[in-house]
Image: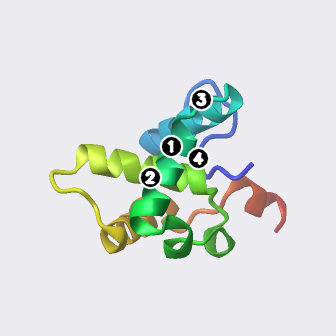
């Protein structure tokens, strides 16, 4: 799985960033239920900010859908809308933050 925090649990494990866990859980549930929201977020942030080039999958292993949902949440909770560099910095500091995806951990 390409999540960093959520791994199918019913609640966040002790010591896990529960906010990021919740965003990943929501993304997984939306994808599993064919909810169009992740694709709408991908389309929006790809068109507006070229998200795939800003944070390529090959660099960090995080699916584009998770990145788009995170950007959507940053836009929602921020006083000012995020631009590409603001999101990239926030993403690295608050989401990636020296973590690996579950897939990366399995392939070590």
The reply to whether discs 3 and 4 touch (Cβ–Cβ < 8 Å) is no
| Residue depth check, mark 4 versus mark 1: number of the one nearer the observer | 1
Estimate the spatial distance between the alpha carbons at disc 3 and disc 4, rounded to whole Å: 21 Å
Residue 20 location (% of width, % of height):
47, 45
Estimate the spatial distance between the alpha carbons at disc 3 and disc 1, rounded to whole Å: 10 Å
> How many C-alpha atoms fall within 10 Å of the one at disc 3: few (<14), some, or many (≥20)?
few
Location of residue 108 (image quadrant) = bottom right
Dot placed on the residue nearer the N-terminal end, 2 or 3: 3
- List the single residue furthest toward the front: 47
Location of residue 29 (image quadrant) = top right
> How many C-alpha atoms fall within 10 Å of the one at disc 1: few (<14), some, or many (≥20)?
some
Q: Which residue is mark 4?
A: 5
| Residue depth check, mark 3 versus mark 4: number of the one nearer the observer | 3
Q: Which residue is mark 1?
A: 40
The reply to whether discs 2 and 3 touch (Cβ–Cβ < 8 Å) is no
Estimate the spatial distance between the alpha carbons at disc 2 and disc 1, rounded to whole Å: 6 Å
The reply to whether discs 2 and 1 touch (Cβ–Cβ < 8 Å) is yes
Q: How many marks can you see?
A: 4
């Amino acid at each position: 799985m390409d999540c960093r925090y959520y791994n199918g649990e019913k609640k966040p494990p002790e010591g896990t960033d529960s906010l990021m866990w919740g965003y990943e859980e929501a993304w997984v549930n939306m994808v599993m239920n064919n909810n169009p929201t992740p694709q709408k977020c991908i389309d929006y942030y790809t068109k507006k900010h070229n998200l795939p080039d800003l944070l390529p999958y090959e660099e960090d292993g995080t699916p584009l859908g998770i990145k788009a949902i995170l950007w959507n949440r940053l836009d929602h909770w921020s006083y000012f809308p995020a631009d590409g560099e603001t999101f990239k910095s926030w993403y690295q500091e608050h989401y990636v933050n020296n973590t690996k995806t579950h897939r990366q951990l399995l392939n070590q």
